[in-house]
Amino acid sequence: MEILVTGGAGYIGSHMVAMLDELRHQVVTLDDLSCGYRDAVLAGDFVNGSLHDKDTLNNVFSQHRFDAVIHFAGLIAVGESVRDPAKYYQNNLGGTLNLLDAMRTHEVNQLVFSSTAAIFGIPEYIPIDEKHPQAPINPYGMTKWMTEKILRDYDAAYGLRSVALRYFNAAGAAPDASLGERHNPETHLIPLALRAAIGDLPALTVFGTDYDTPDGTCIRDYIHIQDLCTAHVLALKHLGSGGESRAYNLGNGQGYSVKEVIDVASRVCGISVPVKFGPRREGDPPRLVADASKIRQDWGWKPRYSELKEIVEHAWAWEVKCHK
Ligand code: UDP
């Protein structure tokens, strides 16, 4: 297959491009490098361009005959989305609408979309299945939720079929440390804990110790980046064989508190992660754990790296490599 990956220079996108290449697909990455890195695109063609540039989009679609698009390009910082919602709506919704226009014009009608657990807002029950009410509490989650709605309408009206995958906490790195997490600024727990262990950060700040959880810190469901990418490959197969539009929750189904993650990180590094305790971070729900039984049943998806230790080991190998 020939596949367009938007945001292919970012954390998840770059792992996806590498996996598609291994599976012998033709890949084109479209990325404006506002958050991604050119050297993270290890395979296929690369186009430096934005979803806001309709000419670039049209050129890319004219030069290739894509079977499907995997759409990662988008802004992901919850706090920033609260401070500057216009940026998020313009970028995440505006950019997506331009992409969908180009797909319609060039008759590409299969899309895999990066959605998020943030569409659920504060969970009413755990683990969160697909039937859980959707009530995003920040503009970032809102843009993803609205895109899911738009995709439903585009399917009904134009036959553009899609799979939305609602990620819980993507984590880890390529097992051979060829790729890993590189956000700027980094805000995610695992890379920050490892950087504190390696000495690049004086200490990791734990955001809140007074949550209604067994140890008072937030609980999250960490899913290995490779397992996340595997779900996209299954989504491509589903759409490629004429499957209907779907949305799935994607996580390991196991929750770990911030303190548990720090303990695992300390053991993996062999260095006690230096920590300090701070106030809660705005907009953090106390617990987010996925019920991913639907994608397991429908497509036989199963995480290969379900142990947090393995996820952190891969992330650690990547951090050590970057530190050298
Ligand atoms: N967290 C923390 N200190 C940090 C970064 C994150 O205590 O420096 C906590 C955060 O409050 C959340 C969990 O770690 O409960 C995971 O946060 P992350 O930003 O990695 O992912 P999110 O759940 O926001 O998508």
Image (cartoon, rainbow, N blue to C red):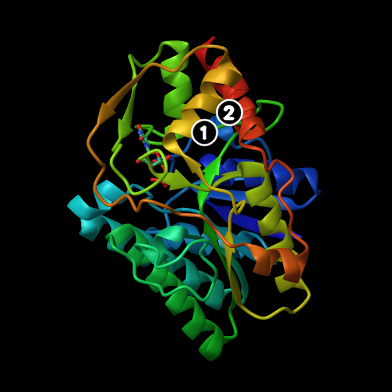
Asked if residue 307 can be seen in this view, the reply is yes
| Crowding near the residue tagged with mark 2, few <14, some 14–19, many ≥20 C-alpha atoms within 10 Å | many
Residue 280 position in % (x across, y down): 25, 41
- Residue drawn at the location 29% of the way across and 57% of the way down: 88
Q: Nearer the viewer, residue 118 or 41?
A: 118
Q: Which numbered mark, 2 or 1, is in the foreground of this view?
A: 2
Which residue does the numbered mark 1 point to in the structure image? 181
Residue type pointed to by label 2:
Ala
| Residue 214 image offset from top left, x and y in percent | 42, 43
Give the mark count: 2
The residue lying at 76 percent from left, 60 percent from top is: 1
Q: Measured along the vertical axis of the image, is residue 250 above or below residue 190?
A: below
Where in the figure is residue 93, as x and y percent of width and height? 36, 66
Left or right: 93 in relation to 170: left
280 and 228: which is toward the camera: 280
Q: Is there CB contact under 8 Å for labels 2 and 1? A: yes
Mark 1 secondary-structure assignment: loop
Hey, which quadrant is residue 68 in on the image? bottom right
Query: Which three-letter amino acid code belongs to the residue tagged 1?
Result: Glu
Quarter of the image where one finds residue 130 = bottom right
Name the residue tied to disc 2.
Answer: 315
Of the numbered discs 2 and 1, the one sitting upstream in the chain is 1
10 Å crowding of disc 1: few (<14), some (14-19), many (20+): many
Point 51% across, 13% down: residue: 323
In terms of depth relative to the viewer, which is nearer, 11 or 53?
Answer: 11
Question: Residue at point 43% right, 78% down?
Answer: 149
